[in-house]
Amino acid sequence: MFYMWNRWSERECETVFGEMSHHLWDKWCSYAEDTVFGAAERFYAALSDNNRKKLVDRACLCYDGRRNLPVDECKEK
């Protein structure tokens, strides 16, 4: 959840989900429309297993508990 609270943006959504990003960004916005509290949890719960894996893999790349990469360094090499 740290990743979702601190890094989640439309650009991150595009990076994680590619072609599906527009649909999933709209879904995110619908969960966060009234309040952002609980939006990350609801969004994650609504994802398919494959999309959950993509999100978790990206979160681990950006923040793995031992380091906190600057946003510009949060990309695969």
Image (cartoon, helix red, strand yellow):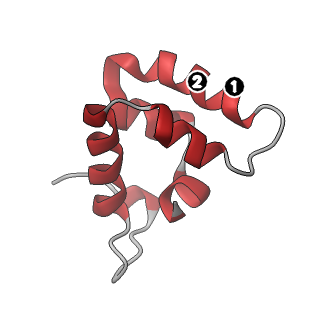
Q: Is residue 4 above or below residue 63?
A: above
> Mark 1 near mark 2, Cβ–Cβ under 8 Å?
yes
Label 1, secondary structure: give it: helix
Q: Is residue 11 above or below residue 41?
A: above
Outermost residue on the right side: it is 34
Outermost residue on the bottom side: it is 66
Q: Residue 34: where, in percent of width, then height?
A: 84, 35
Q: Residue at x 41, y 30 (%)?
A: 14
Label 2, secondary structure: give it: helix
Q: Residue 64: where, in percent of width, then height?
A: 32, 72
The residue where tag 2 is placed is 27
Where is residue 10, by image quadrant? top right
Q: Amino acid at mark 2?
A: Lys
| The one of 49 and 12 positioned closer to us in this rendering | 49
Relative placement, left or right, of 26 versus 49 is: right
Q: Is residue 18 above or below residue 37?
A: above
Q: Residue at x 43, y 23 (%)?
A: 21
Disc 1 from disc 2: Cα separation: 5 Å
The residue where tag 1 is placed is 30
Q: Residue at x 48, y 31 (%)?
A: 46
Q: Residue 8: where, in percent of width, then height?
A: 54, 47
Q: Residue 25: where, in percent of width, then height?
A: 55, 26
Relative placement, left or right, of 17 versus 37 is: left
| The one of 76 and 28 positioned closer to us in this rendering | 28
Where is residue 52, by image quadrant? top left
Outermost residue on the left side: it is 77
